[in-house]
Structures are given as structure tokens and as C-alpha cells.
Image (cartoon, rainbow, N blue to C red):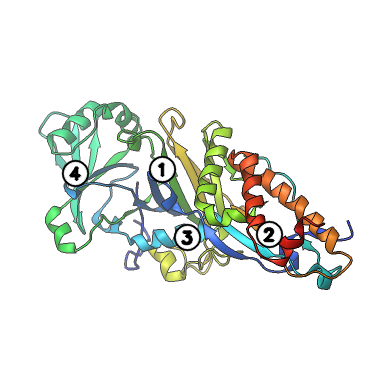
Amino acid sequence: MKGLNWLIPLTIVVLAMISFASPALAFCGFYVAKADASLYNQASQVIIARDGNRTILTMANDYQGAAKDFALVVPVPVILKPEQVHIGDPKVIQRLDAFSAPRLVEYFDPDPCNFYPQAPLPATRGGVQTLQEDRAESKSGLGVTIEARFSVGEYDILILSAKESDGLETWLTQNGYQIPDGASALLKPYIQQGLKFFVAKVNLEKFDQSGFQTLRPLMIAYESPRFMLPIRLGMINGKGEQDLIIYLLSPKGQMELTNYRTVKIPSDQEIPEFVKEVFPGFYKSLFTKAYEREQKKVAFLEYAWNMGGCDPCSADPLNPEELKQAGVFWLDSPATNSTFITRLHIRYARNTFPEDLNFQATANQENFQGRYIINHPYREKLECSEAKQYRQLVKERQQQEAQNLATLTGWKIEDIRRRINWIESTSDSWWNRIWHKN
């Protein structure tokens, strides 16, 4: 890749009297849970670091099975050389996931007798926000050419070009690659676009010698005006809907899709206290509800932030060395040394995403995160004239929190209210002993 220093470690992975105001204005909350990629059974994660026409792509798939059966076929815009392919570190993907995952935060009401009126209580924001939007010619007569052949770590790599999709499918099958039936139809558009094919297969002897128990990510670097991610080919052996989480890294600002709508995941909603104990199930239900509401044809923005900070932080920002391992190659440039991360979450199937993903870089530095808020009432003894009114306001807030949760997840409002009442009735605090007296 022109101008790219491969000496640095890189990583790419595949396939009232008492008013309510903003919690952040009164006191700091803190992160207590996150909705990371481990929530999903079939989830691929991809890092794309891009500046100008230069791209470093890290692919981490969720392959499960014997290493001998693994084969990866990825359309690429150029013929890759050995120095453009590296083995990635799975820990960097885990770090990006933890840093950018939707998160739960909690706040604790101050004593309304001491803080009134200088420090107002955390606010109820109302209902749920609306979703927005070595070159060898094959002698088989199949029209397949081996443009390059080399090994990287435990992988044997081929770069192929092809004239006909049927010929490529036949060639792969004849050479021991387990390609699902019907691959030809999905290979054809890439051949017509003049794309090459990056083919990786596990070298079992090297894999055994490596001591690794799972396949490591592959990262590739290339220079091309095309800014796209081929997902259609991965639908060949996908069973039903698949989840894809994309970490897009840029020196300028948010990355966005050009051929599909992107909407922000519902965020900044206050929800009942008990969700802290069931947060993974809460977020899975929320995502599914939003996905169905949008008719399954959108990408969801879950996070957008400059890597220099976070608020609140579900994990520390990646340091410069980790960013380089994630493919960020511009940090040593005097012109640009910042990194903006955009996290997109796509759930797709053949009928909902008929095209590959096309992106564009923007200078939009707007911050966004999937963030959900728990407000804990003040439950110690209250001896002031405002106590009764405070308790009434908390009751109203909890009613709104229950409605928010029902709208976000589709859970039954009766079950939510029952759970809230059960928590109140089983608490021994003075707050609950007097709750029903006022």
C-alpha cells in the first residue's frame, strides 16, 4: 500500500416547587452496564480505518467449527501483496466494542430537603424520542487466474481474478474449498465490477504450531476510491438474519452509509431501576423493536464520538498504540492526529439488504451514544415540608419510566408496573415504609 508503514502493528477483523432538570447538571452519573457484541449469537465485527482512498480493513467473524473447514472469500478492489495482509489481535476488537457499546448509567437523587432549591432533581424527559433516520493462469479453462499466492500466519492466501462466476465457483470447489451451492449468483456482480477475490484457508500445521485455540482476525490494507463493505457474499452460508457491527475510524468525523438509511438507536431514556439487573435482555428487546419498527432496512447508529474522550465511559478510550493496532495509520501526521469512531449495527438478510454497503466520510463531529438512565429515589428519612411533594414527583417519574420501557421494548406495561411495585414492597427502607402513607 503506497505510503503506509507496515512496521507499526496493525489490526483488522473480518466477516412544581421542586423542578426536574438534566441529571448531568446536578451531579455525575456513572456507567454500570453495556450492551456489547456478546449479546448476539451470530455477529460479525469489522473495523474500517479510512483516510482519503487508503483503507485498512480488519475482519473478525464468528466462525464456529473445525479449522480445516474454514475458508474465507472476500471481494477486494485491488490485487493484494503479502505486505498488505497481516494478522490482527482480537483484543483490539474487544476494546473497540467495550468503548462504543450502548450503556446504562445511574444517578442518585440528593436529599430534597438539603438540596432544594439550589440543586434540582434529575429530570424526566418525557416519552421516547422518535427514530431518525505470483501470477499463474489456470489451465482448467474456467477463466480463473491466481494473481498472487502467499502465507500470513496460519493462513494460506490466494488472490484470484475471474471471468465468469460459474467458473470461479467450480474452481473453488475443485480446489477443496467448501463453497455452498448457489454461490455463483452472488459472485457474479463482483466479477462484473472487476473486483478480485481474497481467499484465505487455514494451514493446519501452522495453526497447530501457533498454539491459538481460535482463528485470529485478518487485516488487509489497500488504496482505492471505492469505500464499500461486501456483505452479500456472506449471506451464502448465513442462517437467517445476521448481526454485523462495524467500527468506522476516521480522522475527520462520522462515517455514514450512502445507499441505506441510518437512524439513531433510541437513546437518553429514563427507565425503571430493575432494568439494571436485566440490561442485556432489555437492550436486545429494544434493538429488535427498533429494527421491526424501521421495517428491517436500516443501519442503526449506536455510537459516534472522538476517541479523545467519552461521557460516560464504559471503557477507557483506546491509547495511540491500540489505535494503530486497529488500523489507524494517520496518528503520526502533523495535520491529523485525532480519531473519530462511528459504530453502526446492522441486522440483515438477503431480502432486506439487496446491496453491499457503500460509505462516505464526513466532517460531522456530532457526538451520540446509546445511553439509558436509571434514577434512584432518595430513600432516607425526610423531615421537611417538601417531602410529600417530592414523593409524588418520584411516583410520576416512575410511571413515565414504566411507559418509556414499554415503548422501547414492547414489554407489557402491566408486567413492568408489577415489577416496580414488587421491588418497592420488598424493600425495608424507611422510604418504602412511608411510601403508601403519603
Q: Which residue is mark 4?
A: 69
Report helix, strand or loop for mark 1. Answer: strand
- Mark 4 or mark 2, which has the lower sequence index? 4
Q: CA distance from mark 2 to mark 1?
A: 40 Å
Instruction: Say whether marks 4 and 1 touch (CB < 8 Å).
Output: no
- Mark 1 or mark 3, which has the lower sequence index? 3
Q: Nearer the viewer, mark 2 or mark 1?
A: 2
- Is residue 137 toward the left or the right of residue 166 in the image? left
User: Which image quadrant: the C terminus?
Assistant: bottom right
Amino acid at pointer 4: Asp
Q: Nearer the viewer, mark 4 or mark 2?
A: 2
Q: Is residue 172 above or below residue 4?
A: above
Q: Which residue is mark 1?
A: 229
Report helix, strand or loop for mark 2. Answer: strand
Instruction: Say whether marks 3 and 2 touch (CB < 8 Å).
Output: no
Question: Badge 2 local density, few (<14 within 10 Å), some, or many (20+)?
Answer: many
- Is residue 114 toward the left or the right of residue 184 in the image? right
Q: Which residue is mark 2?
A: 375
Q: Point out the residue furthest to the left here.
A: 139
Q: Nearer the viewer, mark 3 or mark 2?
A: 2
The percent coordinates of residue 122 (x first, y second) are: 75, 60
- Is residue 209 toward the left or the right of residue 265 in the image? left
Report the residue at 57% width, 39% height from top: 290
The percent coordinates of residue 414 (x first, y second) are: 65, 40
Q: Which residue is mark 3?
A: 98
Q: CA distance from mark 3 to mark 2?
A: 23 Å
- Mark 2 or mark 1, which has the lower sequence index? 1
- Mark 3 or mark 4, which has the lower sequence index? 4
